[in-house]
Image (cartoon, rainbow, N blue to C red):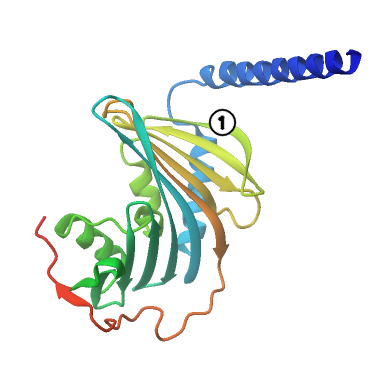
Amino acid sequence: MQSTLYRRLAATLAKCSVIAAVAGLSVAVQAQPAGIAPEAQQLLKASTDFLASQKQFSADTRNTLEVVLKSGQKVEFNHTARQSVQRPNKLRAERTGDLVNQVFVYDGKSLTLHNPQDKAYAQVAAPDTLEAMLEFARTKLDIVAPAGDLLNKNVYDILMDGVTDSFVVGKAVIEGVRCDHLAFRAPHVDWQIWIQEGAQPLPRKFVITTRDLPNAPQFAVTVTKWDLKPTFSAQTFAFTPPAGAKKVDFLPR
């Protein structure tokens, strides 16, 4: 009986400690002054500059998308992805999950989307740089490449566009890696980024909260693995239609 009492007391103390820690964090965060914090800006700039300087890399990600039903209830969908990038004009992204099973291939001349389950693919001529292709896909085809903004060389300008407030939340651990946790606010969205400490300030997690939609759904990307020295083959950025696959047209935007 005494042992049970001690366990209950320990559990109660543990809960109180967690509540106190959360309360302390809440006070610290709420005390942040309005405006863009220089430290948050500098940490973000260092990270985006470092990633833009990498000639080639691959990243494995775990992604979560929230959808709000008419009832107001949130439903979560998940998928994993692998991005392989070779600057200035190569990209392969493979996504598998609840809502999507798709291969995205850009070889510097054409952009291909392949849906293996549907045995169908679409292919179109594309601009000759990664940045121009990403813009073309978004504006002309209404397609956003997985983590596309983070692949762009001018990602800092894209992320900071419209930002009115930012601050450093503190330290955090993502996938076993110690990071700086930053928070930003723009007119319609809030977003957070977790950046790895040290000589390789890689983004480890990215969360977007859409404030102008009911119940503010979120989209989150967690990088489970970075490889800055990947080995790519000649087929990595090439697409050969599998037997039985049907070519279809992209739908107009």
Q: Position of residue 11 (x, y in %)?
A: 76, 19
Image position, residue 72 (x, y; %): 29, 25
Q: Residue at x 25, y 74 (%)?
A: 128
The residue lying furthest to the bottom in this view is 234
Which residue is rendered at x = 42% and y = 69% of the image? Answer: 85
Where residue 7 appears, x then y in whole percent? 82, 19
Pick the quarter of the image with the C terminus: bottom left
Q: Label 1 sits on what residue type? A: Val
In the image, residue 244 sits, relative to residue 160, either above or below, namely below
Q: How many marks?
A: 1
Q: Nearer the viewer, residue 241 or 210?
A: 241
Who's the residue at 40% across and 49% down the image? 156
**Residue 189 lies in quadrant:** top left
The residue lying toward the viewer, choosing from 84 and 54, is: 84
Helix, strand or loop under label 1: strand
Q: Residue at x 86, y 16 (%)?
A: 6
Q: Which residue is mark 1?
A: 169
Residue extending furthest right? Answer: 2
Q: Is residue 3 left or right of residue 189?
A: right
Tell me if residue 146 comes above or below residue 54 in the rendering: above
Asked if 128 appears above or below 173 in the picture, the reply is below
